[in-house]
Amino acid sequence: MIDAPPLHAVRRAADLWRLLVSLSALLATVLLAVATRDVARTVQQGLLTTATALPPDLRDGLVGAVQGIALLAPTAALALWGVRRRIDPVQRVVPAAVLGALAAWSLTHLALARSRPDLWPEVLAGRGALVRAGWPSAVYLAACAAAVVGAGPWLGPRVRRALWSLTAACAVLSAAAAALVPLDAVAALAVGGAAGSAVLLLGGAPTDRPAAEAVADALVASGIPVATLRELPSDDQRPGEGTLYHAETTSGSRLAVRVLAAEDHNRDLFHRLARRTLLHHPADAGAQSPLGAAEHELLMIVFAARTGARVDEPVMAYPVAGGGALVATVDTGARPLSALTDEALTDELLIAVWTSVARLQEHRLGHRALRPEHLLVEPGGVSRLTAFARAQLNALPDVLGSDIAELLATTGIRVGPHRATVSALAGLGPELLATALPYLQPLALIGPARRAVARYDQEAARAARAGGGRRMLRPGGRPSLLRDLAAEVTAATGAPPTSPAPLARLTWKKVLGLVGAFLVLHLVLPQFANAGAAVDALRSANWWWVLAVVPVTFISQAFSTCLQLGTIPDRLPFGPTYEVQFASSFLNRITPSNVGGMALNLRFLQKTGIETGAATASVGLQSLAGALSNAVVAAVFFAWAGRHGRGLHVNLPAGRYALPAIALTLAAGGLLAFTPPGRRFLREKVWPFLRAAGSTMAGIASDPAKLAIGVVGALGLPLIQILGLGLSVHALGGDLPVVQVGAAYMAARLIASAAPVPGGLGALEAGLIAGLTALGMAAGPATSAVLIYRLLTFWLNVPLGAAALGVVQRRGYV
């Protein structure tokens, strides 16, 4: 007897992989066509010249073969599905083909049109076969590729590979016969792969897992006389870890069966890729087939049992028809530790679990998935370890320490940091427990454990916020389970304070360093060409006016601090917030559009215990308030300067990107509103975020003092910069009134805001010099005044902000 739910459409990891690969190939093709347009045109012209050297009859024969395939293959496929009355493939193939054709048409007419050789239409003149040369076009080829991908889940491996080979061959032959530009052919295949994969991800596809009948056949073929086979409910399944079954033999013995398939292998690729990207020593095994993974897990269970740990009793590993494999163990009726009530989580049970973990640690067997759902508890209270799929012999200290840290964190979520630490100490001993201290960090908990700890901290922060109205926030004082566990372990073991282990391969510091180095090479170094002029300007300047510009940098950060304080309902201490604003100003010097500063402010607010939605709303409100204040100040100064007869006229492109932005917004809204994954994303992610943001704005609006502080900060920022520019102008002997200096500054700032460079570097200087000279100041003094102003208000922030960033990091503010 087989008890299994009917197969249903799922979203497969293979489709996500194909989408990512296709988009990467498409991006590379577009960049090649746009960034190196002349080179791409020349290379493609050479390829077309080589193709035209072929005999005309051979070229016409190649074109005719491609056109015949392009006409017959889709017709035959639709007729075959119509005869078999297969509706599901058609529901994926038709939308995929339409999407691929639309995307290819847009791409070939917008991004790739100017990279084609000018002589290409002449190459097609007089050539043809069934129809004129040039058909099938890139649009038709993309539609066919998308249709092949969309139909792939309903096809066998051989048929799927044959159709893909046929589509790729058509693209190659078309390019070889000069009927299609090579870049268009590559882009068509990439667009088709992306469109077909996107449709499968949105609509779902048949699973890659073996059917329950195939699992039963495999058990019988291995010599196990199966009487019943029951698939566990979806709530008891663990995504990415195979399909779980309970089996009973004719003699009454019960087995727990886990079936691995290609889908699990594809999901594991994401896991291994994340670890290899983030960690110095990921310690991951290479790619394994389902049968190899099943045999590896069985071997690890046997070895774990030899260490003295209580684990599942292994039975066998065996292949399953269709490319899958199964692992069978004795079923004792145990339940996962995560399914037990809080009352059932006794100290004796937790200590027994830790005792088994100690045996693994002593023999250097890394489990690498020690979480409550992988700990089984029998009806009599006996615990067992399971899920050894990623286990590793002779494990590195990073793996062993992360195992203890992961189980300590996940049990701490249920029983609290103190009780979790006491149980671990009783089962492990102080020496083994102390080895987890360097690994009590989020990076050591990649996967479900990390997400569970983040949810725990977020709920604790939400509870603390709900406990009392507006409160004074402490920088770095957000509730942290890992920090509390580290304190408990340090106190319990007597170990000295330990720094976190350097696990990260790619950190935000390294990324910022690379971005900063790039900007220094391409943006900062050219500025040194004006170093001589700056030195001459300083020699001829009035030093008292120059020194008066220096406080502008510090006062600007005070106004930024006021703006930050005015966008949070709770109270932030001024000193730490002022330091973070200085650090943000440094990051804004090496990242465009103030992205680095906004990210640092967001992290600062999160570390104080503010929810992510509220913190994001605060950062967004700061940007909005800054934009509105700039608009108000600009309007006032433009109007004021205009009444004095020497206003500035600024022409800014308006509406250029409005239509594409509206189209993208409507498309994204349609995907979110009319697809189940989109609605789930709105329900689980967007609405909670919007509620938190709305409560933040409501709290600010109800506090007049907060509004006043925010307005002072928002208006003070541009005004203090205008004052600094005016002082620099007077230091060089300029006599422009402050209203004209303000108008010149706001006009230059509006122009520089469109430049995708940090702080408008280069664009702001050019705009200021042009504005000052337009108002009657000589070009030499205007240039010198702008150089002095930028030196004391822009470049002075670099060393001061870098030092502030180091301070706030050491103090745990970010």
Image (cartoon, helix red, strand yellow):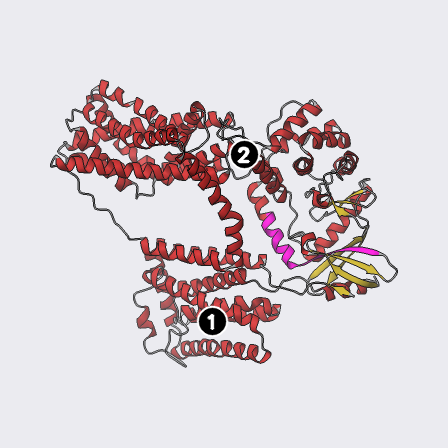
Residue found 57% across the figure and 46% down from its top:
274
Residue 210 % position (x, y) = 69, 63
User: Looking at the rendering, which quadrant does residue 276 occupy?
Assistant: top right
Badge 2: residue crowd in 10 Å (few <14, some 14–19, many ≥20): few
Residue depth check, mark 2 versus mark 1: number of the one nearer the observer: 2
Kind of residue at badge 2: Ala
- Secondary structure at badge 2 equals helix
Among the two numbered marks 2 and 1 on one chain, the one whose residue lies closer to the N terminus: 1
* Residue 356, x across and y down, in percent: 78, 38
Front residue of 641 and 543: 641
Q: What element carries label 1?
A: helix
Per the rendered image, the range of residues in magenta is 254-272
Q: Mark 2 points at which residue?
A: 466
Residue designated by label 1: 170
Q: What residue type is labelled 1?
A: Cys
Q: Cα distance, mark 2 to mark 1?
A: 64 Å
In the picture, measured across the screen, residue 34 lies left or right of residue 202, that is left
